[in-house]
Image (cartoon, coloured by chain):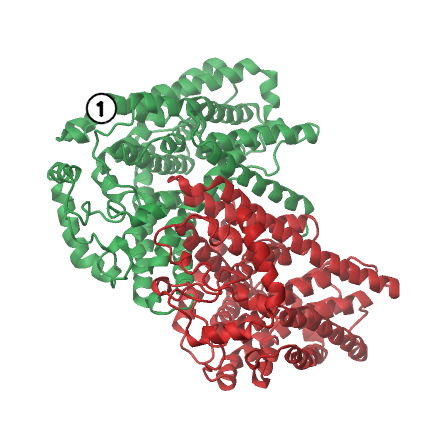
Chain colours: A green, B red
Amino acid sequence: MTSDHASVVSLNLFVALLCACIILGHLLEENRWINESITALLIGLFTGVFILLTTGGKSSHILLFSEDLFFIYLLPPIIFNAGFQVKKKQFFRNFITIMLFGAVGTLISFCIISLGAIHFFQKLDIGSLKIGDYLAIGAIFSATDSVCTLQVLNQDETPLLYSLVFGEGVVNDATSVVLFKAIQNFDLSHIDLNTALQLIGNFLYLFIASTVLGVFAGLLSAYIIKKLYFGKLIRHSTDREVALMVLMAYLSYMLSELFSLSAILTVFFCGIVMSHYTWHNVTESSRVTTKHVFATMSFIAEIFIFLYVGMDALDIEKWRFVSQSPRKSIGVSSLLLALILVGRAAFVFPLSFLSNLLKKSQSEKIELKQQVTIWWAGLMRGAVSIALAYNQFTRLGHTKLRENAIMITSTITVVLFSTLVFGLMTKPLVRLLLPSSKHVVSLPTPPSTPKSFTVPLLGSGEDSWANGGTHNGPPPSTLMMLLSCIPTRGVHHYWRKFDDSVMRPVFGGRGFVPYVPGSPLEQSVHQWHCT
Amino acid sequence: MTSDHASVVSLNLFVALLCACIILGHLLEENRWINESITALLIGLFTGVFILLTTGGKSSHILLFSEDLFFIYLLPPIIFNAGFQVKKKQFFRNFITIMLFGAVGTLISFCIISLGAIHFFQKLDIGSLKIGDYLAIGAIFSATDSVCTLQVLNQDETPLLYSLVFGEGVVNDATSVVLFKAIQNFDLSHIDLNTALQLIGNFLYLFIASTVLGVFAGLLSAYIIKKLYFGKLIRHSTDREVALMVLMAYLSYMLSELFSLSAILTVFFCGIVMSHYTWHNVTESSRVTTKHVFATMSFIAEIFIFLYVGMDALDIEKWRFVSQSPRKSIGVSSLLLALILVGRAAFVFPLSFLSNLLKKSQSEKIELKQQVTIWWAGLMRGAVSIALAYNQFTRLGHTKLRENAIMITSTITVVLFSTLVFGLMTKPLVRLLLPSSKHVVSLPTPPSTPKSFTVPLLGSGEDSWANGGTHNGPPPSTLMMLLSCIPTRGVHHYWRKFDDSVMRPVFGGRGFVPYVPGSPLEQSVHQWHCT
């Protein structure tokens, strides 16, 4: 029935490989070294080799890496889920530190990598790169991929660290893409103060406009679902609610693309607002469903990307130039890896010091071991780097120019090396640095499994800026939390008041929707207003 | 970031329209006439007019109707969900009647429409259609679309009728597509007994092989998930389970496409097996999630199709030939509608009579009013007809030939007319014929809303061939059911034994997975072994 037999074959192979990755990832869960991303990358590489051999060296991939596929279909669910599942309490409590790392840190890293590239690449003689290319290289290699580390870190044992790495990862993705766009929007043949100011202005505009659009889309979805109140109808109500949430989240992403804003930021904030308001306006089954749907979509997209990158890496054509001058390519890749290591160290340790100065309580300070973990977590480079590199260096013909071909292969080399070598060392390293430490404030597990749905200590930190206690009275750690959050009372306190008196009556949210029996999440409402 | 601005615009518009359809559909829920499909079709038509006016008559659609999109992405979730949510007890109890209507009935309808077309079209002089074309027309217009009626029928008030219309719809879809494929596979320039036998043989092969593949894929997924038992791990277990179920269901569909089988049948039986075995092997939250994910995907796909058909219907180019000979086109469309009415009446009433002869209990006989409803339910033609017509009549150049253009526009006319006119009359007609009748055996609501998750009378008929009682002792209707199912004890009884002693220990399923606290679905295990 379908027109193209080849596309059916490749879809079959791809779906089968995805299944294999999930099953293998599960079986290797207890393994010391491997995690899900590395499994997918390795399976992708092996499949690439296999296809290369069966097709007689003609091709190694069944699907060409397409920027559109990545930015329109794979990235939105990942970033939206990040916003939807983020522990908002932790995220907003550490907001300043996260923005320091994610935005300022990425800018520092960008500057170091760009300047380093300008300085050293000219000695290597790899062709005529323009100033715009050097700045793009800075942006490309500032985009971290902290999935590997997040898979190892335990959100309950080290909530501060997890929230910092997680938050930095999302803000970093957005910052590097916004930076990349801002660079492409300008004619950088002659840089003066005016251009630089415009660049900064453009960056800030993209940042703010994207956030506003995301918040608006989230609030709109909350308002619509609250007004219509689908729950009162039996038939299709859950389908409608889930469909509307998914579609409106996607709409926010696409609208942002349409207005040339940063879709990543938009969908991230849309996710945060949806989990704070919209999620509480829907029926219990819609809540369970959306929670897992978003997580599953993100999970599949992540595996898909690693599989894809692994398979695409072996494309013969790209490596032709490399085989002519292997030393030069190795030089460029090593240099870039060195710049990444230095560029990240150059902001993690100083900014941690700065952040520690701002915090008064000991539990919120970032210890040296944690600083090393944060530094390590951001060393991996992933699909965002590859997508940006493709965008920058394949626009003028498919890697026909030597310098473009070298940059593409170097990006792939850096991504593969950092994900495989650094990624494999992550599990042992994190276990060495943080031996199942219980010294940080412990938060209960989020309700992501049926088990936790029966545990009374539930959902805290998961769906409110303001929350943190339980039904059964505060355990010691909650008391500690209560003490530690007094200093930051200011802004949060007023936000709470505003949220309760203005926002929630209009947009719904926890405590402002009818009580549904059997919903354990409703039990801890208005118990502790700490933050 | 994305290469194609136009595609971003159209994606935005489409997603926004989908949201509008869902919201409007909800608001019009109480309306006497309108239902969700008609809303989507009308919104599609209005958008088509709007685009037509703004582009100055150049184009009416933002996406061209693509067979691939329909058969690879939109149809699988709809059919899979049909299999997954089907009340298996009702489905298998009425299996013979459903197969009579769905397979035999479709064949009768196919013969009448084909013969009628051969007989009358030659008088209309619409060009040189070959014998293969006439047979294809028979298959195209035998594909019913009972969505409109199913949206009106109440599954709890008229379970027999609902199950017949629903079951016939799915089997009919599969039969007409298989028939269409079988016709295309043969050189029909000279028909003799040999060709006819081969055609029947091909049809049976497609039917059986597709079913076996679907059952195999479903059992494989059950076995894998049971063996791995994801539930024991906290992290990602639900994501993994949901992802595996979605991916394996899709894989079964694509594999069937790869082997040139009937993917519709495969994915339907995969859905049935998955809900009988796999669904019981996963965690409680995975169960809630998958149930609603599949329903939501199907819901979105359905709306998408109607929106799409509405928008595509106004494509100017197709109507050029019609404007040259409007009478001829109206003649063809009217003729086809008449053939549809006759072709359906020719099997619904005789086959109902036959089915009533086979049934002994009064409650299982199909009354005349119900026969009329069944007849009416299958008068609408939908996206399957359009997709098949496109496949048959646009292969040799895009509607350049006059007879092809006339057939395409006639298909669109028949689909629009039947969906809008017949569709609008469905709600009043069903209410007139079946005034909220409670005289048929009543089954409790399926657990599609949070409310029903707290009701003790739960999930019966939903997830087992063998089930029908509750925790609290049988209410009168259950007793009646118990009596009425004794005659059909034979085959079902042995299947039950086989299922309990061989299948469930290997593949899991209800009662063969560890008891999860808080799962109400586990409570009624092994209480009543009636069917």
Residue B59 seen in render:
yes
Q: Which residue is located at x 67 percent, y 56 percent?
A: B262
Residue B228 in the image, given as x and y percentages of width and height? 49, 39
Residue B513 in the image, given as x and y percentages of width and height? 46, 48
| Structural crowding at the residue carrying mark 1, measured as other residues with C-alpha within 10 Å and reported as few (<14), some (14–19) or many (≥20) | some
Q: Which residue is located at x 75 percent, y 76 percent?
A: B112
The foreground one among A310 and A190 is A310
In the rendered structure, the residue with mark 1 lies on which chain? A
Q: Quadrant of the C terminus of chain B?
A: bottom right
**With respect to residue B262, does B3 lie above or below?**
above
Residue A38 in the image, given as x and y percentages of width and height? 47, 29
Q: Quadrant of residue A88?
A: top left
Query: Left of A114 or right of it: where is A4?
Result: right
Q: Quadrant of residue B52?
A: bottom right
Residue beneath disc 1:
A367
Q: How many marks?
A: 1
**With respect to residue B186, does A369 lie above or below?**
above
Residue A69 seen in render:
no
Query: For numbered disc 1, what is the local secondary structure?
Result: loop
Query: Left of A56 or right of it: where is B489?
Result: left
The foreground one among B262 and B88 is B88
Q: Quadrant of residue A164?
A: top left
Instruction: Tell me the kind of residue under disc 1.
Output: Glu
Query: Left of A443 or right of it: where is B247?
Result: right
Query: Left of B520 or right of it: where is A355?
Result: left
**With respect to residue A217, does A340 lie above or below?**
above
Residue A57 in the image, given as x and y percentages of width and height? 68, 27
